[in-house]
Amino acid sequence: MSKMLKSSGGIGAATLASRVLGLVREQFFAAFMGTTPIAGAFQLAFMIPNMFRRLLGEGALTAAFIPIFKAKEKNEGEAAMWHSANAVISGMLLLAMAIVIVVMLALSLLLIVRTWNPDTMLMFQLMRLMFPFMVMACLGAVFIGILNARGHFFVPALSAAILNVVLISAAALVLSLPKDYDPSLHKQVFILAVAVLAAGVAQAAYQLPTLRREGFRYHWVTPWRDPTVREVAVKMIPGAIGLAAFQINVTVNQSFAFGENARIVSEFQYAVRLMELPQGVFGLSLATFLLPTLAALAVEKNYAQFRSTLRQGVNHIIFINLLASVLLFAMAEPIVRLLFEHGKFDPHSTDRVSFGLVCLVPGLIAFSMVNILARAFYALQDVKTPLRISVFCFALNVLLTLSFLFGTRLGPGALGIANSLSSVCNLGLLLFALRKKLRTLEMEETVAQLPRLGLAGLAAGLTAWGLRLHWTAQAGHATLLLKLGEVFLPMIAATMVYFLLALWWKIPSAHEIGEFALARVRRTSPKD
């Protein structure tokens, strides 16, 4: 059983908890906002500072910093390592606060200079209130990067759950307000905005006890005089686009959609939340484990093990996320109905969100693979190649979005198709460039097993689709119990078909994941 599965399994468990809480959060949002324009305004207003957080924090900054952090530890010792960490944190805080001040002033001016339509005005007001969230969220993300580099994965990964717990509490508070309070969603939504700020502080504070046990003590280091900060900045600026391509694409798409119809923003966001469950639980968990691991191998110039580790991660990603893709594709409508259809989220919303999900999930494997391959480049301290590729794919995404969104009536499906196609293109170009850089990727085994995996995925998809149609025709979905059966029985049967076929066809990832699961069961079973 590989160290990769043990470490990424722990991260995956923590990420699963966070993603499940994220779904609960979206259920609360659906209950009191549905897919209304107000929901779209809130989602877009939160998406912008969250994108900056991913760019400056858990995206490019940590990707550029972790290899340098590992090299400092190996070559210069812990004192130099912690000094470089404090310098980078000081520089990040200055940059993040400067961006927040500039953006808040710009938003204030926009609200003063002209009268906007109500949806746009609400979005600007919410964004101005929530934008400071970026500072604490970036700080928390850097803390996570430091802990990952020190070999801590589970506890830092669990920090994402803090945001969801705070927002769920705020949404529950809104739903519990008495009817005579103020029924206006325009005012109630500001309670969620304040909760976002509180969540940012809680996420950063959560990391501090583990950091202190590792020996971290923060002190101010003048960043513009520090060579580590300059090195990180040089790699971070182009890397911001390269590593966060999916988040940038989604944000740009949603901005276009808000101008066309504010409802599309929330419709697509619910679909993205469902797609991010498997992507985060396994794709991002593996990517989180791989960055410091590959960075250490690159420092040692152990490129044979570098290729082997990368290949193993790619195999696991394809195996797990192919199953997730076919299940989400075949079961989109009943899944959305079970999770979200209540309160202001009606059957029409279910149709729109499930269509957006069907158009988005074909790119799930590509989304996850891009995360892994981008980290392989950063471990090799090459940020320019992913940047060039991402700029091209970003332009392609914009063109596709404009074509599908304004030239058709696809609604949230237009955004899903554009993101899927641009991510597949991004994946292909990254594979080509990485093979050229390493001379060979040694992926022959991976390519050889793709036809068998494709057949297993097709069989699983047809199983889920057929059983779902049979259940709906015979039992329907009038009650919660029937909705649960409509979703879980076909998914369980399809998963069994997929794994049995993969084991029969001797897919390595199936055997390794099966052994890992059995070991976990034996460990937790009571002793005689």
Image (cartoon, helix red, strand yellow):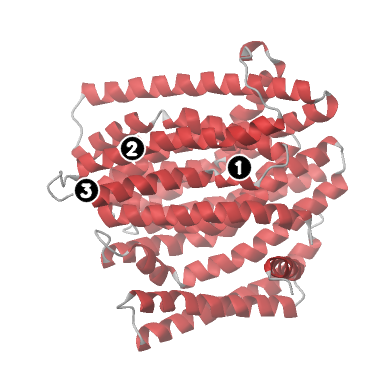
Q: Residue at x 46, y 35 (%)?
A: 200
Instruction: Report how far apart the C-alphas of labels 1 and 3 lie in the structure.
Output: 34 Å
Q: Earlier in the sequence, mark 1 or mark 3?
A: 1
Picture quadrant where residue 228 is located: top right
Asked if the residue under mark 2 is in contact with the one under mark 1, i.e. CB atoms within 8 Å, the reply is no
Residue 406 appears in the picture as rendered: no
Which amino acid, mark 2? Ala
Q: Residues within 10 Å of mark 2 (few under 14, many from 20)?
A: many
The residue to which callout 1 is attached is 156
Q: Secondary structure at mark 1?
A: helix
**Image position of 254 (left or right of 306):** left
Q: Secondary structure at mark 3?
A: loop
Of badges 1 and 2, the one in the foreground is: 1
Instruction: Report how far apart the C-alphas of labels 1 and 2 lie in the structure.
Output: 24 Å
Compared to residue 517, the image places residue 469 above or below, namely: below
Which residue, as the protein is rendered here, is positioned at the far front? 528
Q: Position of residue 403 (x, y in %)?
A: 39, 50
Q: Residue at x 46, y 32 (%)?
A: 201
Q: Residue at x 53, y 33 (%)?
A: 204
Q: Residue at x 82, y 41 (%)?
A: 297
The residue to which callout 3 is attached is 177
**Image position of 110 (left or right of 10):** left
Q: Secondary structure at mark 2?
A: helix
Compared to residue 501, the image places residue 130 above or below, namely: above
The residue to which callout 2 is attached is 193
Of badges 1 and 3, the one in the foreground is: 3
Q: Position of residue 475 (x, y in %)?
A: 35, 86
Residue 210 appears in the picture as rendered: yes
Q: Earlier in the sequence, mark 1 or mark 2?
A: 1
